[in-house]
Image: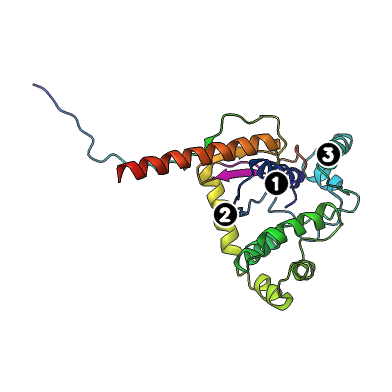
Amino acid sequence: MSETTSNPTTETIAEPRPIIQLLEQSDDAGGCCGGGSCGI
Amino acid sequence: MQCPWCYIGKRKFEAGVAAYGDDVEVEYHSFELAPDTPVDFSGSPIDYLSERKGIPVPQVLEMLERVTGIAESVGLHYDYDSVHQTNTIKAHELLHYAKAHGRQLEMKESLLKAYFVDGGHVGRIDDLADLAVTVGLDRADVVRSLTENEYLAAVKADVAQATEYGIQGVPFFVIAGKYGISGAQDPDTFAQALRQVRAEQSDAAAVEETSA
């Protein structure tokens, strides 16, 4: 006896809209994140 | 508004656009770093960072000295002795008001200069209205708009959009709605990114044209 499984109630989870990072950018550029360590 | 890297990043981006050499349409969006800051915070940024963020004063001083030096390198004369730490939600609302009235770019520059260079207060409605007048906006209508929270929902929508994009810090530059550049990058990075996006858009347009 075989059993076929299916998942008819698959939920669609909204993914955050992706931002495609450009390749050539420095990780050392200054920025502020709200944590204070970067000088808000 | 209060991130020192945003003003520096603005200058570097502008230099990048100049090197790119073509027209670029710019629009500013809101991102709140410290929404719990009181409008009338009485201390200095040093007090704020040491007392509220727990950073030792010597480290804060070192940070500010470093960022002030980098600001100088792009022609910005930060004066942290006169900076008024405050809540910037009304300033963000004003930026949206200015956008609706065709003055956003001027307003953004004016707000940053007021905060980092001129010791202006960018949290109080009256001070913001005074600043708005300098870029050609109607003072009474600005007061009305800010008092009525006319653009508060627009600010919150920007913050929600930033969350959706996965943005966790500023400055953050979104090009053509799908490419991101994080931080105050060098002008060449911006110029190269703009060239890359333009090339991809040209290719896409060509494909669309040939398939039509």
Residue name at image x 61 percent, y 47 percent = B22
Dot 2 amino acid type:
Asp
Q: CA distance from mark 2 to mark 3?
A: 31 Å
Do callouts 2 and 3 point to residues on the same chain?
yes
The location of residue B12, given as percent across then percent down, is: 72, 42
Q: Residue at x 81, y 47 (%)?
A: B48
Q: Secondary structure at mark 1?
A: helix
Magenta residues (range):
B167-175
Q: Which residue is mark 2?
A: B158
The image quarter containing residue B145 is bottom right
Residue under label 3, please give it. B73
Q: Position of B91 compared to A21: left or right?
A: right
| Residue at the top extreme, as displayed | A1
Q: Circle 2 — which element?
A: helix
Mark 3: which amino acid?
A: Ser
Q: Quadrant of residue B124?
A: bottom right
Please name which of the two marks, 2 or 3, marks the residue nearer to the observer.
3
Q: Which residue is mark 1?
A: B14
In this rendered view, identify the residue nearer to me: B1 or B202.
B202
Pinpoint the chain carrying mark 2.
Answer: B
Quarter assignment of residue B122:
bottom right
What's under tag 1, amino acid-wise?
Glu
Residue toward you, B46 or B2: B2
- Mark 1, chain letter? B
| Label 1 in the same subunit as label 2 | yes
Looking at the rendered structure, the secondary structure element under dot 3 is helix
